Amino acid sequence: MPVSVRPASIADASVVAALLAEMGYPTTGPAAEAHVDRFITDPASRLQLAELDGAVVGLVATHLVPRMDDDAFTCRVTDLVVSVRSRRGGVGTALLRAAEDHARTAGAPRLDLSSGDWREEAHAFYRAAGFERRSSSFVKRLTTTPEPQPT
């Protein structure tokens, strides 16, 4: 049976939580619901789910990001997850195709993503899908509460 891709809804929060946990990002039901809501209510974002034989087996989250160069903006894949039992069956390819469709529909001339250095299998998949390594990603975790400022 072919893979189908559809938009996520709030009712999908529990399956989104399960997929995120498979990637090493465990979350609670209410937090997953908030994540899904953020993506489905933001017009620049999309959260799409892959189904195989009636079961959700993957997700792709994308967001349109403005840029200061001639590309004007990019479509960023913020998350791509395929359940372990469904890998190497075309699910990831279908999800990337859905991400590309979001980019093209919005007029974004490029699709980009980051992937942890330890995810070597994912890197091979991305290269096979036409992605090329162009830069390094740097992350700085910030506190969520502002530091007190001297007066």
Image: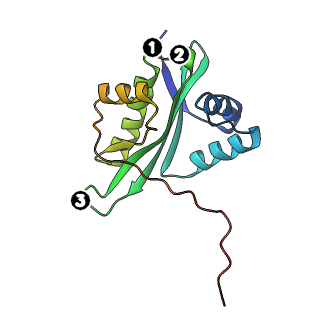
Which residue is depicted at the point 53% across and 15% down?
86
Q: Residue furthest top?
A: 1
Which residue is depicted at the point 63% across and 37% down?
25
As shown in the figure, which amino acid type bears the numbered disc 3? Asp
Measured as percent of width and height from the top left, residue 141 is found at 56, 57
Residue under label 3, please give it. 70
Measured as percent of width and height from the top left, residue 14 is found at 71, 31
How packed is label 3: few (under 14 Cα within 10 Å), some, or many (20 or more)? Answer: few
As shown in the figure, which amino acid type bears the numbered disc 1? Gly
Do the residues under discs 1 and 2 have CB atoms within 8 angstroms?
A: yes
Which residue is depicted at the point 65% across and 86% down?
150
- Relative placement, left or right, of 150 versus 106 is right
| Whether residue 87 is situated above or below residue 68 in the rendered picture | above
Measured as percent of width and height from the top left, residue 114 is found at 42, 42
Under tag 3, what secondary structure?
Answer: loop
Name which quarter of the figure residue 89 lies in.
top left
As shown in the figure, which amino acid type bears the numbered disc 2? Ser
Q: Earlier in the sequence, mark 3 or mark 1?
A: 3
Coloring basis for residues: rainbow
Q: Quadrant of the C terminus?
A: bottom right
141 and 128: which is toward the camera: 141
Residue under label 1, please give it. 89
Disc sitting over residue 86 in the figure: 2
| Whether residue 113 is situated above or below residue 89 in the rendered picture | below
Q: CA distance from mark 3 to mark 1?
A: 36 Å
